[in-house]
Each structure stands twice: as structure tokens, then as C-alpha cells.
């Protein structure tokens, strides 16, 4: 398929190739995609960092990248309804993690979290709804060996959240709280006499979470079956995506379009330039 003869686009391609940007050695590339209809503010925190992390603005259809060293362990989530001033100070309706774009605390509940522990030979990852739900998240590994399946949701839990779990702002449901957060009982929080995977079982509330996000942890001990093991070089974290929809993004110096739960489908490396030079929507128009 021939590229369009656009002088501005060709100039951008030339500049990007000339820059010689390379992927850092001993790093795993996270491609973060916003498929939501509104702007979100992704947050990234490294475990053991006293909640000092990174944050940024990600507009609809845009992609961002994060390089994590081998051995990295942390979490990624999306903040919604944020209002930051010119000095990057402000707050968010969901997932708030301090008063600045860069996080200084854990994400406020309810929040959907993508969790990772990266090893030398094997990685562990999952999507967690233990702290509630504010955005659909999908994790897709890029290649690798092992299970390497897609984690996350098949829909948006905010659309059918139980009324007693609904988290509202200005009369609109912007999140779905966990039963532990709402009722604070041992049964729902898996503590006390329920602090055991045999005693703490799924409830009607966690089952409703699992129905929408079958490949995610719906309560504290659900991670026994929801944590995925894989040896993969790169990962895609997509917001407002579902496990089976098409996601096109830059991955390992290639444009890749993920169309199944088994991972990425890759195109020629020349699309690397297009991914940097154009927003995602423009690339999809060219492809399809």
C-alpha cells in the first residue's frame, strides 16, 4: 500500500528517521492508548516509591510511551474529570493522586488499576477492580512466551453499576465503588475471619464486576486466577478499549493493530514515523 504523497508528512518522516531515536536497552516499552471519548490523565507509580510517580495528559485517540527497566513493579491507571492550571496543579474527579499532574499519593477510590511486576524471565500482570472501577482498561502483551493472554474488561461498568455502589459527580455516574469501600465489612473486605481465600468468596457485587470484566480481579482473593504470567518485551495499556476490539498503536518500532485477545498484529516499521507524526485517528483513516 503506497503512502500518500503529502510533502508535510514526508518531511515529518524524514526528520523522525534522521533523529535516530532508539529504545533504551534493558527496558520494556509500555504503549498507553486513550480510546475514550474524553481526555484522561494517566498516572504511573513505582512500588516502594512513596507514591511519587508520573502523570500526563492524554487526549482522545492519542498514544504515549513509558519505558520500564527489568524488575520494575508498579501500577498504571487513568484519572478523569481533571482540572489542572498552567502550573500543573489541580484535582480530578476519579483516580486523584495529589494536587499535581505528577502523583504524590495513591489513586483515590474508585479506580481501575493495571498492575505489573516485571522479571528477568517472566512478568506478572493483571487488571484490578479491588479498589473499584472508573475506566475500562485492557492489557495486551506484545509477543512473549507463556499464557500472555489479554487482561481487562469487555465493557464499561459505569453503565450498569448497582445504585448502592455508584460514585457520582454532578449527578453523573463517573465510577463504581467496591463493596468493601461502601460497606467496610469483613466479608466484603476479606479480613478478620474472612482473611482466607477459602472463607472469602465472590459476592453478588464482585460477580457483577466479573461479568463486565471477566479477565480482571473483582475482589481481594480473585487475583489467584486473574494474575497472568508471561515473558513479553512490551505491553499495551488501553483505556476505554475492550479485549476484542481493534487497537492500533506504535510498538517496538512498528505500527501494530491488535484485533484478537492473542496479542498484536504488526505492520512495517515505516509506520513508526506515522505514529509519531500523526494522531492515532489519522493513522486509522490511512489504514482503513
Image: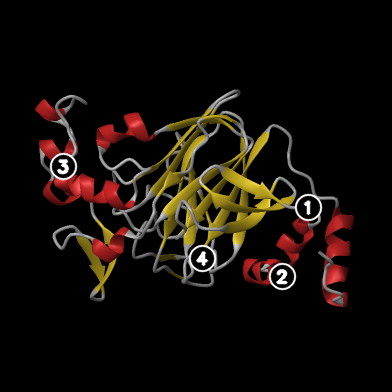
Mark 1, residues whose alpha carbon is within 10 Å: few (<14), some, or many (≥20)? few
Q: Which residue is mark 4?
A: 88
Above or below, 233 relative to 157: above
Above or below, 254 relative to 286: above
Indicate the position of residue 133 as horizontal and vertical percent values: 31, 54
Compare marks 1 and 4 and give the one earlier in the sequence.
Answer: 4
Compare marks 2 and 1 and give the one earlier in the sequence.
Answer: 1
Mark whose residue sits in front, 3 or 2: 2
Could you tell whether 32 is left or right of 277 in the image? left
Q: Is 108 or 267 nearer to us in this picture?
A: 267
Which residue appears at 52% of the width and 35% of the height?
148
Q: Which residue is mark 2?
A: 286
Mark 3, residues whose alpha carbon is within 10 Å: few (<14), some, or many (≥20)? some
Could you tell whether 210 is left or right of 40 in the image? left
Mark 4, residues whose alpha carbon is within 10 Å: few (<14), some, or many (≥20)? few
Q: Which residue is mark 1?
A: 268
Q: If the image is split into quadrants, where does the N terminus sit?
A: bottom right
Above or below, 168 relative to 52: below
How far is mark 3 from mark 2, CA to CA?
A: 46 Å
Can residue 132 be seen in this snapshot? Answer: no
Name the quadrant containing residue 190: top left
Q: Is 27 or 235 nearer to us in this picture?
A: 235
Q: Is 178 or 246 nearer to us in this picture?
A: 246
Name the quadrant containing residue 287: bottom right
Which residue appears at 86% of the width and 56% of the height?
17
Mark whose residue sits in front, 3 or 4: 3
Q: Secondary structure at mark 3?
A: loop
Could you tell whether 14 is left or right of 61 in the image? right
Circles 1, 4 touching at the beta carbon (< 8 Å): no
Mark whose residue sits in front, 3 or 1: 1
Amino acid at each position: 500500500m503506497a503512502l500518500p504523497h503529502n510533502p508535510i508528512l514526508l518531511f515529518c518522516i524524514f526528520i523522525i528517521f534522521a533523529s535516530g531515536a532508539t529504545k533504551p536497552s534493558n527496558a520494556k516499552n509500555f504503549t498507553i492508548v486513550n480510546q475514550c471519548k474524553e481526555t484522561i490523565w494517566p498516572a504511573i507509580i513505582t512500588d516502594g516509591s512513596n507514591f511519587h510517580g508520573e502523570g500526563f495528559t492524554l487526549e482522545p485517540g492519542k498514544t504515549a510511551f513509558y519505558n520500564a527497566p527489568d524488575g520494575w513493579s508498579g501500577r498504571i491507571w487513568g484519572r478523569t474529570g481533571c482540572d489542572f492550571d498552567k502550573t500543573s496543579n489541580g484535582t480530578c474527579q476519579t483516580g486523584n493522586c495529589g494536587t499535581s499532574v505528577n502523583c504524590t499519593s495513591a489513586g483515590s477510590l474508585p479506580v481501575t488499576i493495571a498492575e505489573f511486576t516485571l522479571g528477568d524471565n517472566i512478568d506478572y500482570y493483571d487488571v484490578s477492580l479491588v479498589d473499584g472501577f472508573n475506566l475500562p482498561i485492557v492489557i495486551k502483551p506484545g509477543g512473549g512466551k507463556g499464557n500472555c493472554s489479554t487482561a481487562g474488561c469487555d465493557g464499561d461498568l459505569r453503565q450498569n453499576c448497582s445504585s448502592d455502589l455508584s460514585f457520582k459527580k454532578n449527578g453523573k455516574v463517573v465510577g463504581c465503588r467496591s463493596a468493601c469501600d461502601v460497606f467496610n465489612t469483613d466479608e466484603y473486605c476479606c479480613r478478620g475471619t474472612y482473611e482466607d481465600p477459602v472463607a472469602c468468596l465472590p459476592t453478588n457485587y464482585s460477580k457483577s464486576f466479573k461479568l463486565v470484566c471477566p479477565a480482571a480481579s473483582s475482589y481481594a482473593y480473585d487475583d489467584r486466577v486473574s494474575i497472568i504470567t508471561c515473558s513479553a518485551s512490551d505491553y499495551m495499556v488501553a483505556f476505554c478499549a475492550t479485549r476484542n476490539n481493534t487497537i492500533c498503536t506504535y510498538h517496538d518500532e512498528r505500527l501494530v493493530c491488535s484485533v484478537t485477545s492473542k496479542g498484536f498484529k504488526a505492520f512495517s516499521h515505516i509506520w513508526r514515523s506515522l505514529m509519531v507524526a500523526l494522531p492515532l485517528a489519522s493513522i486509522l483513516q490511512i489504514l482503513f
